Image: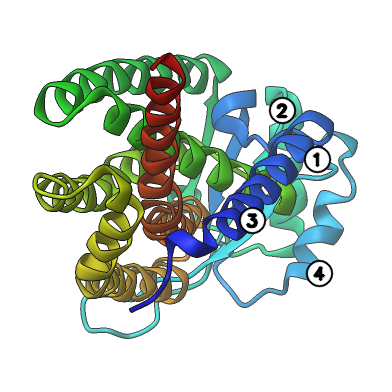
């Protein structure tokens, strides 16, 4: 039997390092927000022939406002499974219409076979991303309140506190990793965070339910032993559930990267993969030990009162 409770201080230290590193990165570097949050222009075009990213960059270098623009080569497969023609996506700050025309003329001078029907230019406002973020934060707040109420009624308030603390830990770690790596985030990232929040609570609830069942007839002095046994009893289930989910996510990551080429979807899956790993870790090393700490603190308070 693995002694999880005996190693809880080491787990707390690791979690503290992850959270602090993420928060420091957020304070000093922030998040690499995409155009969904900052606003900008997105160009989708098919050049009609083979090209290299160096050639594309040489065209973009002629325009100062496109410095630092995200350039993405995309390629899918047609209905027969054959590789389709490679396309190009350019995400940049707002570009005036006159400068857009100059940009398209520059592309046509290099690739005269560009089909006008294969060109799409979109202006994206930051309002959409900001509104979605506010709705996501509101959803998280409502979810936290409902979870606290449910877990308090179904189990007890200390279980609710431990669960919410572990869920917030997961969100902070995922956001912190994206801040440290400066991975560009857009609207799908917000959906990923909400998904991680919902996914993480499942494994935690299963473990605390086992703890509740095992402590019914246990002595108070045996709480640490009971918590450790409960975690070990659910260990195989937790690992199998996480591995199954990870296999699916890794398959999606390969598919999005090789067949679809969407950066936003790739970022979405990466956030989910990190969330599943951190969520499994926190349900074992954070939520349950934290409940034990709260329980032990209450027992010490009662003893001092006597």
Judge whether residue 187 can be spotted in this image: yes
Give the numbered dot on residue 95: 2
Give the numbered dot on residue 54: 4
Tag 3 near tag 1, CB within 8 Å? no
Q: Which residue is mark 3?
A: 14
Please provide percent x and percent y for residue 238: 26, 66
Answer with left or right where residue 261 lies relative to residue 160. right
Give the numbered dot on residue 209: none
Q: Nearer the viewer, mark 3 or mark 1?
A: 3
Instruction: Pick whichever of labels 3 and 1 is earlier in the sequence.
Output: 3
Q: Nearer the viewer, mark 2 or mark 3?
A: 3
How is the protein colored in the picture? rainbow
Please provide percent x and percent y for residue 153: 12, 21
Gap in angstroms between the C-alphas marked 1 and 2: 8 Å
Q: Which residue is mark 1?
A: 66
Q: Nearer the viewer, residue 237 or 172?
A: 237
Gap in angstroms between the C-alphas marked 3 and 1: 41 Å
Instruction: Pick whichever of labels 2 and 3 is earlier in the sequence.
Output: 3
Tag 1 near tag 2, CB within 8 Å? yes
Instruction: Pick whichever of labels 4 and 2 is earlier in the sequence.
Output: 4
Q: Nearer the viewer, residue 196 or 109?
A: 196
Residue depicted at x 47% and y 70%: 257
Instruction: Pick whichever of labels 1 and 4 is earlier in the sequence.
Output: 4
Please provide percent x and percent y for residue 228: 33, 62
């Amino acid at each position: 039997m693995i002694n999880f409770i005996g190693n809880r201080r080491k787990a707390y230290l690791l979690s503290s390092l992850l959270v602090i590193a993420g928060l420091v990165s957020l304070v000093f570097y922030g998040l690499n927000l995409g155009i969904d949050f900052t606003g900008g222009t997105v160009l989708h075009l098919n050049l009609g022939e083979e090209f290299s990213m160096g050639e594309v960059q040489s065209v973009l270098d002629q325009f100062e406002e496109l410095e630092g623009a995200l350039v993405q080569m995309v390629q899918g497969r047609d209905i027969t499974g054959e590789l389709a023609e490679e396309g190009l996506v350019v995400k940049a700050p707002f570009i005036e219409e006159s400068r857009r025309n100059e940009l398209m003329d520059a592309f046509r001078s290099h690739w005269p076979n560009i089909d006008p029907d294969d060109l799409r230019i979109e202006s994206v406002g930051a309002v959409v991303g900001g509104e979605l973020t506010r709705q996501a934060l509101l959803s998280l707040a409502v979810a936290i309140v409902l979870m606290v109420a449910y877990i308090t009624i179904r189990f007890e308030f200390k279980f609710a506190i431990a669960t919410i603390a572990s869920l917030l830990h997961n969100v902070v770690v995922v956001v912190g990793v994206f801040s440290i790596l400066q991975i560009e985030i857009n609207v799908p990232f917000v959906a990923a965070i909400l998904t991680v929040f919902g996914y993480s609570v499942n494994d935690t609830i299963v473990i605390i339910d086992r703890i509740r069942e095992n402590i019914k007839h246990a002595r108070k002095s045996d709480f640490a032993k009971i918590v450790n046994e409960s975690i070990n009893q659910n260990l195989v289930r937790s690992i199998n559930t996480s591995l199954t989910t990870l296999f699916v996510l890794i398959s999606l990551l390969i598919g999005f990267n090789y067949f679809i080429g969407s950066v936003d979807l790739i970022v979405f899956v990466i956030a989910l993969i990190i969330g599943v790993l951190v969520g499994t870790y926190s349900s074992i090393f954070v939520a349950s030990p934290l409940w034990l700490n709260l329980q032990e603190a209450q027992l010490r308070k009662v003893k001092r009162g006597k």
